[in-house]
Image (cartoon, grey):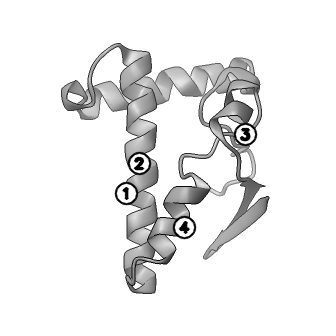
Amino acid sequence: MLFSFRFPSHQFAGRRCGAGDAEGGGPRSFLTLEEAGLVEISGLSTHERFLCRLTISSLNLLRVVAEQEGCSIEELNAGRVCDWFLKDKLKREQNIGSAVLQWDDSDLPF
């Protein structure tokens, strides 16, 4: 299933997928269709649904970070998360398929 969303000056597009696609080297989603469905039927406002999806996907990413850093989520702190992002960035620069987070930021204005 294709999806896209728009921020004021950027559009991002990708493909919703399950963990199997991510393990096979395809794009990874940190919000499952089931989780997104639960958010949609929650009765929350548009803004609250956005924040809820962001929070759930952040939790799912933190699980990956903790696993790769060899610690529990509770042991993560800002420094460890920043270190993980730097490591993942290096993977992305060397071989986009080996990074957890995959995007092309070459045309971003900042």
Tag 1: amino acid = Thr
Q: Please give the residue where the numbered disc 3 appears in the rendered image.
A: 27
Distance from disc 1 to disc 4, alpha carbons, whole Å, reads: 15 Å
> Are the residues tagged 2 and 4 within 8 Å (C-beta)?
no
> Are the residues tagged 3 and 2 within 8 Å (C-beta)?
no
Residue 79 drawn above or below residue 106:
above
Looking at the rendered structure, the secondary structure element under dot 2 is helix
Q: Is 59 or 81 nearer to us in this picture?
A: 59
Q: Earlier in the sequence, mark 3 or mark 1?
A: 3
On screen, residue 50 versus residue 109, left or right, reads left
Q: Where is residue 95 in the image (x, y as percent from the top left)?
A: 74, 20
Tell me the mark number nearer the camera, choosing from 4 and 3: 4
Give the label on residue 37, or none: 4
Distance from disc 4 to disc 3, alpha carbons, whole Å, reads: 20 Å
On screen, residue 60 versus residue 15, left or right, reads left
> Are the residues tagged 1 and 2 within 8 Å (C-beta)?
yes
Tag 2: amino acid = Ser
Q: Please give the residue where the numbered disc 1 appears in the rendered image.
A: 55
Query: Local crowd at mark 4 within 10 Å, few (<14), some, or many (≥20)?
Result: few
Tell me the mark number nearer the camera, choosing from 1 and 4: 4
Q: Which residue lies furthest to the left in this view?
A: 74
Q: Position of residue 27 (x, y in %)?
A: 72, 39
Q: Image point 64% across, 26% down: which residue?
A: 99
Distance from disc 2 to disc 4, alpha carbons, whole Å, reads: 17 Å
Tag 4: amino acid = Gly
> Are the residues tagged 3 and 1 within 8 Å (C-beta)?
no
Q: Is 72 or 43 nearer to us in this picture?
A: 43
Q: Is 60 or 88 nearer to us in this picture?
A: 60
> Are the residues tagged 1 and 4 within 8 Å (C-beta)?
no
Q: Image point 30% across, 25% down: which residue?
A: 80
